[in-house]
Amino acid sequence: MHHLGHFLAGKRADAPQEALKILDIVLRELSTKRYCPIGRSFFSPDIRAAQRLGDGLESWCGFYQSIRPTQMGLSLNIDMASAAFIEPLPVIEYVAQLLGKDVLSRPLSDSDRVKIKKALRGVKVEVTHRGNARRKYRVSGLTSQPTRELVFPVDDNSTMKSVVEYFQEMYGFTIQHTHLPCLQVGNQKKANYLPMETVQHNAYDQDPYAKEFGVKISEKLASVEARILPAPWLKYHETGKEKDCLPQVGQWNMMNKKMINGMTVSRWSCINFSRSVQESVARGFCNELAQMCQVSGMEFNPEPVIPIYNARPDQVEKALKHVYHASMSKTKGKELELLLAILPDNNGSLYGDLKRICETDLGLISQCCLTKHVYKISKQYLANVSLKINVKVVASQDWPEVTKYAGLVCAQAHRQELIQDLYKTWQDPVRGTVSGGMIRDGVSEGQFYQVLLYELDAIRKACASLEPNYQPPVTFIVVQKRHHTRLFANNHRDRSSTDKSGNILPGTVVDSKICHPTEFDFYLCSHAGIQGTSRPAHYHVLWDENNFTADGIQSLTNNLCYTYARCTRSVSVGSPPAYYAHLAAFRARFYMEPEMQENGSTGGGSCHASKGTRAGETGVRPLPALKENVKRVMFYC
Ligand SMILES: *[C@@H]1O[C@H](CO)[C@@H](O)[C@H](O)[C@H]1NC(C)=O
Ligand SMILES: *[C@@H]1O[C@H](CO)[C@@H](O)[C@H](O)[C@H]1NC(C)=O
Ligand SMILES: *[C@@H]1O[C@H](CO)[C@@H](O)[C@H](O)[C@H]1NC(C)=O
Ligand SMILES: *[C@@H]1O[C@H](CO)[C@@H](O)[C@H](O)[C@H]1NC(C)=O
Ligand SMILES: *[C@@H]1O[C@H](CO)[C@@H](O)[C@H](O)[C@H]1NC(C)=O
């Protein structure tokens, strides 16, 4: 406690982790007894009525709790949480819901059995055949035979008895549905499971454990002062009807505006993989796209280099190469600047294959069009990808606009080379200021300074390798989104401090009281809430050689949030560099050859089988390199 006191008073730099942990344990004790603890959160169907989700599941409300040292002293951070639980149901009813069919009259198929086994493994069940002796077991599996065929030894002499008989004799219980399999339960008795008590309002002043340790917790939420940073004026081209624009509540649109630096697309083609899109629709779409680009200040050739090319999804590579070469010969060797691809909705791997071939093989920039959202499909596609991206970085390359970012991703962590490479990718590397983003997952607060030392060293070495005396001042900021601090406007009905959803306004910044006792950190909510409670990002300035003022860094951060290329909204997670690093990493997962993404079964096609095995053996595989012309653009956007 002495150490903690000194830390809170700013007399010591290192947080006393043990003391904090002990206090945390004390304050969790009561809730651990009352509720169902999962991770750092507690759940109960009684906190707020459980809601049915279907498939035998229901959602329980709960809360996250942790103790944090802040400028106000110790703060208890409580946040809402919810999680899916299995409904308390008779198992047969649960299975019927799970399969969505009648399970009493028909035998189960093998795939049904697999599904049930997966869903029930680890689930606690309570027996009902023994009157008041309601023992609980944890399900460990499912028998492959139906109940009526199951026999087991009843004594040491290997006398066998059927399950049906046994229940009849022992408990006078007639098993009705003998065609269903049996649950296998672990033999360790979980008799110490306690039923959830009726839950009261969380009253920490009545917490006997807290009391015993002399901890008092105020019943009131902490009240902090916030400022709302103004949105930046956005500059558009002089020749547009609107030359500039002030975003309202974190958003704006492109109506009547022209891009400052509209690009030229003079050579493009379109490839069609979708059976359901009619030719007139596809042509109409391409025309409208070209028109819209022109209206927005780009020069976009209305005519493709070659007519829309139709191809089957299973010929993706052949088709892309055809379009690439056919276009090239038409333009006398000039490369295509853009390839539009119309994709069917049902094929996630097509999207991945196309991106991989275009970006690592042909050097083509592509834009895919789907009627459904790409992300949804690719998620399913990626479910089987085991590749772990360790490092993802992006860095801006267009000072002073700071809107264009080159991105690099590698599966193996060689920071210095990666940063060196990134610098080399810029056309004019050693000039101006650069903002960069790097994603590192799973870094806890305790590791911040370790990470700082490592990364700073890599940046320095990379800079020195480019030019011996090149030592740009570095500002190093950690951005976190996964924290549980939430900000609510005190005067909730006051329109001037909340948006339509009742959330705090974009630009809201808090840098006192709930922040670190001594260091340079702040919370900034830069976006407008769309759903639920807005989550401010937390920024921790670990290192600053640019001598930023608090206002300076907060405004810069907020302004950067308005430069994200994918939407006319201010974004929330940190800043565009962090977003772009995520996108680049996401894209890179497609670059592994498709056979490596299979789950190890034989479905991958025989010609790929040997590669597939090799892939299974090595943990980290090198990623195929990007083509040079792809590297220079924001291909991952
Ligand atoms: C097991 O067999 C032995 C010898 O045949 C017999 O004495 C004993 O009673 C049997 N035990 C049970 C539980 O049937
Ligand atoms: C796209 O290709 C498919 C199959 O080759 C074809 O059925 C469809 O009509 C084509 N669509 C367009 C717009 O050409
Ligand atoms: C999906 O695309 C892949 C190529 O990525 C192709 O091999 C496969 O046949 C396609 N599947 C369907 C159902 O069209
Ligand atoms: C920041 O301040 C330090 C100490 O006053 C000074 O040496 C350094 O040059 C300043 N850096 C910049 C980028 O102005
Ligand atoms: C991979 O696993 C999924 C889900 O278990 C399955 O649907 C799919 O068929 C598997 N793919 C291969 C190639 O085995």
Image (spheres, grey):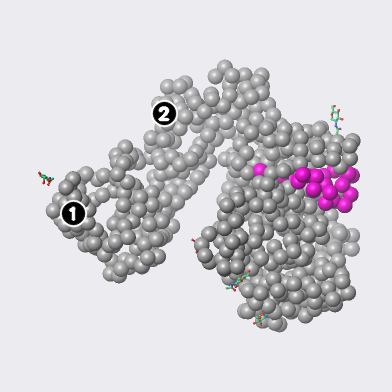
Q: Residue at x 70, y 74 (%)?
A: 318
Q: Nearer the viewer, residue 491 or 436?
A: 436
What residue did someone put label 1 on?
Answer: 160
Looking at the image, is 107 positioned above or below residue 250?
below
Residue 134 drawn at (x, y percent): 24, 45
Is the residue indicated by label 1 positioned so its CB lies within 8 Å of ligand 1? no
Q: Nearer the viewer, residue 254 or 144?
A: 144
Q: Secondary structure at mark 1?
A: strand
Looking at the image, is 387 positioned above or below residue 518?
below
Regarding residue 379, the answer to whether it shows in the image is no
Residue 607 drawn at (x, y percent): 60, 68
Marks 2 and 1 in Cβ contact (< 8 Å): no
Q: Write down the region rendered in magenta.
A: 417-440
- Mark 2 to mark 1 CA distance (whole Å): 57 Å
Name the amino acid type tagged 1. Answer: Met
Q: Residue at x 24, y 51 (%)?
A: 128
* Numbered badge on residue 206: 2
Asked if the stretch drawn in magenta spans residue 426, the answer is: yes
Name the amino acid type tagged 2. Answer: Gln
Regarding residue 430, the answer to whether it shows in the image is yes
Q: Quadrant of the C terminus?
A: bottom right
Residue 49 drawn at (x, y percent): 40, 49
Taking 431 as reference, is 6 left or right?
Answer: left
